[in-house]
Image (spheres, grey):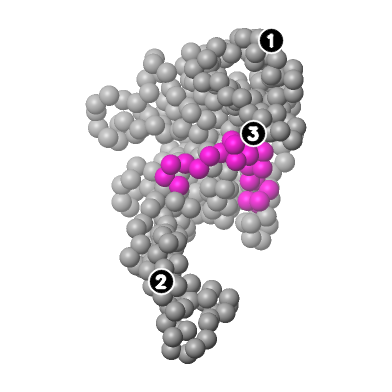
Amino acid sequence: MSVFKNVIVYRIEPAWSQTLAEAEEGLGKQRFVPCGPSQEKSAGWVEPRGEANGPLVESIDGQWLVEYMIESKQVPGSVVRRKLDERCAQIEATTGRKPGKKEKKELKEDITLELLPMAFTRSARVTVWIDKAENRLVINSGNASRADEVVTSLVKSLDGFAVALINTQIEPAAAMANWLLTQEPPAGFTIDRECELKASDDSKAVVRYAKHPLDIEEVQKHITDGKRPTRLALTWDDRVSFELTHGLLIRKITFLEGTGDGAAGGKKEDNFDADVAIATGELGQLVPALLDALGGEAAFSAAVPDEAAKPAAAAAAPTMTTPADAPEEEDAPF
């Protein structure tokens, strides 16, 4: 099991102090229920181990792991349009009039509801790591809107829970540009063979390097000409390779040989515990090292969960993450 692939990191409000039992109770109020026959989408919390009636919060070596489930049904647009055309033609033939925009909209909604029970169901699970000791929230998603949905649910479920995106003293793009220009990455890190450079002018020109040395004059010239790094492949301590983006998203995480990524053989539950322990242990060291390389964190300012969770989630949304940072995940049905 690969616990984390692409992650967005948040800082948890230090005053939040719920116990494991309190968190379990809070998440239980938003436990996942599958879509009903005419329901387009359903979301909620599920058991991280995948065992029915198991705990919603797993604590492994003091690290909490929870999992958010999103299920959706989607009727193909072409089918809806064909049915709508047929329905409109029938109305025109029997009444002699063409349906107006409002009536067409209502017909379309009715057709969608009729077809939903026959639609295929797609689902996605989002792993969430809560590091209470370090006041850190890590969401396993490269999709900003999906991460925002998870944060919203956490704020609703956990009393007093508030988070903010981590911002650094040095912008990631500026730091990456300096590392490429000087070929001097921060201590403990090495520059790998992939990056993306994007022009900041109206041309929006993009240059991508894949499996290519980056210690060449061509790369330096692109940067001096005004292009900014938006992605850069790095390796930390010969243990974890990843791609850093200008929005501070950590992508394409790979635990290298020697980190014990996964447990060979053994019971399923033992493998789960080992995978979580390894992933949280390695990322628990990588994240602070990366933040130090970016000049440390800027002042903390958490979203406060007033009344509804929407303001808190909006404030916590990863606004620095652009569409280039956060491509839709392969399993994303919405």
Q: Give the range drawn in magenta.
A: 312-332
- Which is more foreground, mark 3 or mark 2? 2
Q: Which amino acid does label 2 sit on?
A: Lys
Residue at 44% across, 51% down = 333
Pinpoint residue 281: horizontal percent, then vertical percent: 47, 25
**Mark 1: secondary structure:** helix
Residue ID for mark 2: 83
Residue ID for mark 1: 182
- Tell me how far mark 1 sits from mark 2, CA to CA: 61 Å
Single out the residue that lies furthest toward the bottom: 95
**Mark 2: secondary structure:** helix
Q: Earlier in the sequence, mark 3 or mark 1?
A: 1
- Tell me how far mark 3 sits from mark 2, CA to CA: 43 Å
Residue 48 to residue 60: above or below: below
Pinpoint residue 63: horizontal percent, then vertical percent: 47, 34
Quarter-wise, where is residue 294 in the image? top right
Residue ID for mark 3: 247
- Nearest to the observer: residue 316 or residue 23: 316
- In this picture, residue 33 sits left or right of residue 202: left
- Nearest to the observer: residue 267 or residue 197: 197
- Tell me how far mark 3 sits from mark 1, CA to CA: 22 Å
* Residue 169 belongs to the span the image colors magenta: no
